[in-house]
Image (tube, rainbow, N blue to C red):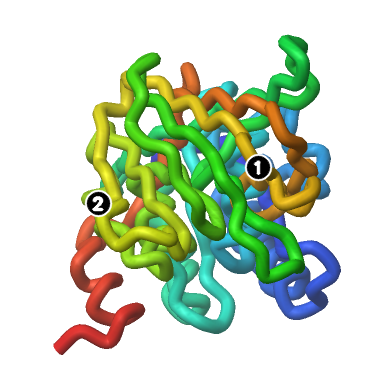
Amino acid sequence: MSLVFKTVSVFSRHNDPAAKAVADELQTYLVKLGCTVNRQKNDEAGKLPADLAIVVGGDGTLLHIARNIASQNIPLVGINLGRLGFLVDIAREDMEKILSEILQGSYQQEVRILLSASLSRAGKIIHQAEAFNDVVVSKGELARLIEFETLVDGTHVNTARADGIIVATPTGSTAYALSANGPILAPELEAITLVPICPHTLSFRPLVIDSKSSVCIRMLDSGQDNSYLSFDGQSAVRLQDGDVVDIKMAEHRVKLLRPVKHSHFDVLRAKLGWG
């Protein structure tokens, strides 16, 4: 068998014995095919000596790994355990057949954008991070609106009182942004969507802007420091009045490898219950 990808790193969902068992089985299969397999912990994904990364688990695990390895230009494949995922879409029972095809070069490749965000306080950057799905400014545990100004490419868009705002990639348009009535974007689009969370005025509607645009969110009223800046729903920083969040497209991309017959619309129908 002629392999396009010869060195593979395998990741499994943290503290999940079922995912680890599948990853163990996958490793044995890949070695039989002639691959060199590295098993690494999720927090060790920063430096990968691999041609391909395979994630066993759910979308959350893939989000974490994708952010960590995007700068290395290593493609990703997701093995789904349990509910169908938007990102990890290869079913456990089809794992060996589809991976054999992918390893031999039979696949679709999707290139997805990432977001890069920085938080400034009193003119000094105090936090930076990337997001595959979304960067979110939102209120905390109290039922209290926050107030913020939104700018795109330095131009004032609006000042709003709301529960927050979601800045999402096309990948993230089917995540939290979808729950806030944001638009579903085709995954290959180079675009960013701005989706308000429960705005106090119905005229504040979701916006779709070019991915080359920069977004700035200035905190006017953080609800007595009861608001947060979060990244893919996996990490968060508390916000204060006067904080400035700058968001733009990251320099690198995420490469997802899909089965040849993969259809984004098939996944949408299955996940969203479309007829």
Residue indicated by mark 2? 185
Residue 111 appears at what percent x and percent y? 34, 36
In the image, taking residue 235 as reference, residue 93 lies left or right, namely left
The residue at the point 20 percent across, 84 percent down is 274
Q: How far apart are marks 1 and 2 (CA)?
A: 31 Å
Question: Which image quadrant is residue 116 in?
Answer: top right
Residue type, mark 1 in image: Asp
Secondary structure found at label 1? strand
Is residue 39 in sight in this rendering?
no
Residue type, mark 2 in image: Leu
Residue indicated by mark 1? 221
Residue 8 appears at what percent x and percent y? 61, 42
- From what the image shows, is residue 130 above or below residue 24? above
Nearest to the observer: residue 57 or residue 193: 193
The quarter of the picture where the C terminus appears is bottom left
The residue at the point 67 percent across, 51 percent down is 10
Mark with earlier residue (1, 2): 2
Secondary structure found at label 2? loop
- From what the image shows, is residue 24 above or below residue 191? below
Nearest to the observer: residue 74 or residue 174: 174
Q: Crowding at label 1, few (<14), some or many (≥20) Cα neighbours within 10 Å?
A: many
